[in-house]
Amino acid sequence: MIAGAILVFEYLYFLLQVQHGWCNLQESLTLAVKEYQSSGIHAKVNESIQQAFLKYGDNVDDLCAVLVHIAKENQLCKILL
C-alpha cells in the first residue's frame, strides 16, 4: 500500500511539472490514481513487496533499501511515457 501511494505521488509530481503548476491539483491527483489503477503495475508492486517482507522482514535496513528499489523500478512517469 505504501509503495502504491509513493508511486501515485511520484506520478502526481510528474503531472504537475508537465502542467506547469498546481492549478489542477485535484484533477491531477485523480488522474494519477486512475493511471496507477489501470496500469496493472500494482499487482507487480504488491508481489514484489510481499517477497521483500518474506526475505528481509527482520532486517529493516535491507528491507527499506529493497522497498526504495521497488518504487524506483516501477515509477509511473517512466512506464507511461
Image (spheres, rainbow, N blue to C red):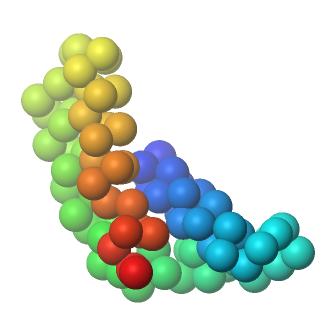
Residue 35 in picture, x, y percent from top left: 49, 81
Q: Is residue 1 left or right of residue 31?
A: left
- Quarter residue 13 falls in: bottom right
Which quadrant of the rendered structure holds the C terminus?
Answer: bottom left
In the image, residue 10 lies at what x, y percent? 54, 57
Look at 77% across and 73% down and name the residue there: 20
Residue 5 in sight from this viewpoint: yes
Q: Is residue 61 left or right of residue 54?
A: right
Q: Is residue 50 above or below residue 9?
A: above
Judged left or right of residue 74, residue 24 is right
View extreme (right): residue? 23
Q: Residue at x 28, y 47 (%)?
A: 70
At which x and y percent is residue 21?
82, 69
Q: From where the camera sits, is residue 12 visible?
A: no
Q: Which of the two residues, 20 or 61, is positioned nearer the viewer here?
A: 20
Q: Nearer the viewer, residue 31 or 72?
A: 72
Q: Residue at x 21, y 45 (%)?
A: 50
Residue at image position (22%, 16%) is 58
38 w.r.t. 6: above or below: below
Disc tally is: 0
Above or below, comparing residue 55 to residue 70 in the picture? above
| 60 is higher (above) or lower (below) than 79 | above
- The answer to which of 66 and 72 lies nearer the viewer is 72
Q: Where is residue 40 shown, x and y percent of the image?
A: 30, 78
